[in-house]
Image: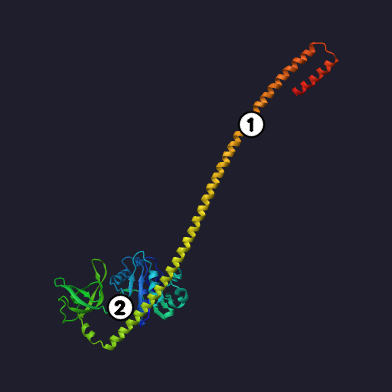
């Protein structure tokens, strides 16, 4: 069974496009890597981010070849994810399900918890690629290829045809033919976009390509669309299909071997899916445990909030009572102060009255002859008066 590598296409385009601007990346280095893998009689599945085409300069051959590759819908080997979808996770999910190795310059550290094998087996299952001294190098696979410039279209065409041969998708039927324009359409047997062909691309002189439903074989080629000013894919080297004859010559032993290989692949996929299911169950259990813990924390917080609310109400009541007592104390002090003021006023009036009496008495003593006893009393009264005056 062929070794399968899961390719982080967008990441490698960035890394392998040396000395280029972010919007002028090159498609050729990745194509060389994919062809090198095919030359080892191994296979791959390559993922691209939704924004990958914008990494190439507008109108460049790199963007045109990328668009053609994605447009041919070779879903057995390539997938451009939808906008908002994380390609990294799809890469790791496929590697996990098929027990495959990943070619990328990413370390995927953010996925350690979800895919423990990244940290455990990363030295073996994560493969890096680089360009050193104008050579494409993948040391873990012993791939060392000299970088080729300005052959992107040729490499893309070679790879597409090799992959379609492996898929058995270089045959189909004539869908229709427009004799006035000498163009026709071929519907491919195993799906994909319909292919345009010109009568000059028919190389089988015995083939009646004007009949709808006629079975044919062909190759994929590129033609330059003058109106759109870019390359499109088309069919070339068209011949009558010998697929039925080839199918009849397949022996029972070959069929059995094919079924056995497919069974092994299915078992590996089932094994990977079972493991994935176990991991998902573990994640669900962990999530449930986390939910219970969070519920417990919420209950504790609610209990604390309730205690705080009770304490707040108590403090508010206490503050209200203390305020009331304070106001009562103020009223009492005001009342006592008023009473004291009245008392002081009364005493002051008594003193004033006494002062008048003393003055009158002293005057009386000054106006009359007094004896010695009265004189002593007079002097004493003068002394008391001075005290009051002081």
Q: Foreground residue, 2 or 223?
A: 2
Q: Answer whether labels 2 and 1 touch (C-beta < 8 Å).
A: no
Residue 329 percent location from the top left of the image:
61, 36
Q: Which mark is residue 336?
A: 1
Q: Could you give the CA–CA distance between mark 2 and mark 1, rounded to whole angstroms?
A: 109 Å
Identity of the residue furthest to the right in this view: 372
Q: Is residue 8 above or below residue 294?
A: below
**Quadrant holding the N terminus:** bottom left
Give the class, few, some or many, for how many residues have Cα within 10 Å of label 1's Cα (few <14, many ≥20): few
**Quadrant holding the C terminus:** top right
Q: Residue 156 lies in what quarter of the image?
A: bottom left
Q: Please give the name of the residue rendered at 77% of the width and 13% of the height, measured from the top-left corner.
A: 364
Q: Residue 371 lies in what quarter of the image?
A: top right
Disc 2 target residue: 163
Identity of the residue furthest to the left in this view: 180
Q: Is residue 318 above or below residue 369?
A: below
* Callout 2 secondary element: helix
Residue 224 percent location from the top left of the image:
25, 70
Q: Foreground residue, 324 or 119?
A: 324
């Amino acid at each position: 069974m062929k070794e399968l590598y899961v390719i982080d296409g967008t990441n490698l385009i960035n890394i392998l496009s040396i000395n280029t601007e972010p919007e002028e990346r090159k498609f050729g280095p990745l194509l060389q890597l994919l062809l090198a893998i095919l030359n080892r009689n191994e296979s791959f599945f390559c993922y691209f981010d939704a924004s990958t085409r914008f990494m190439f300069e507008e109108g460049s051959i790199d963007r045109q070849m990328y668009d053609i590759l994605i447009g041919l819908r070779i879903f057995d080997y390539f997938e451009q994810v939808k906008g908002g979808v994380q390609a990294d996770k799809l890469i790791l999910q496929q590697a996990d399900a098929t027990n495959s190795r990943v070619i990328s310059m990413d370390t995927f550290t953010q996925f350690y918890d979800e895919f423990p094998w990244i940290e455990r087996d990363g030295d073996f299952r994560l493969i890096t690629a680089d360009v050193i001294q104008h050579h494409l190098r993948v040391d873990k696979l012993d791939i060392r290829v000299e970088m080729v410039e300005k052959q992107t279209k040729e490499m893309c065409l070679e790879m597409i045809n090799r992959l379609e041969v492996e898929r058995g998708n270089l045959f189909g039927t004539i869908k229709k033919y427009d004799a006035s324009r000498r163009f026709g359409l071929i519907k491919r047997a195993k799906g994909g976009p319909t292919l345009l062909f010109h009568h000059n691309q028919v190389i089988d002189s015995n083939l009646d390509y004007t009949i709808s439903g006629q079975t044919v074989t062909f190759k994929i080629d590129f033609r330059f669309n003058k109106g759109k000013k870019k390359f499109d894919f088309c069919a070339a080297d068209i011949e009558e299909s010998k697929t039925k004859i080839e199918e009849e010559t397949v022996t029972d032993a070959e069929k059995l071997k094919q079924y056995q290989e497919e069974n092994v692949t299915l078992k590996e996929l089932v094994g990977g899916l079972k493991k994935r299911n176990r991991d998902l169950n573990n994640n669900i259990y962990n999530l449930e445990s986390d939910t219970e813990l969070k519920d417990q924390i919420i209950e504790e917080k609610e209990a604390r909030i309730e205690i705080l609310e009770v304490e707040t109400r108590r403090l508010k009541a206490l503050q209200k009572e203390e305020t009331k007592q304070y106001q009562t104390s103020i009223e009492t002090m005001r009342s006592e102060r008023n009473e004291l003021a009245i008392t002081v006023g009364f005493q002051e009036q008594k003193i004033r009255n006494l002062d008048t009496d003393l003055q009158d008495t002293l005057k009386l003593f000054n106006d009359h002859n007094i004896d010695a006893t009265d004189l002593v009393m007079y002097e004493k009264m003068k002394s008391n008066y001075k005290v009051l005056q002081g």
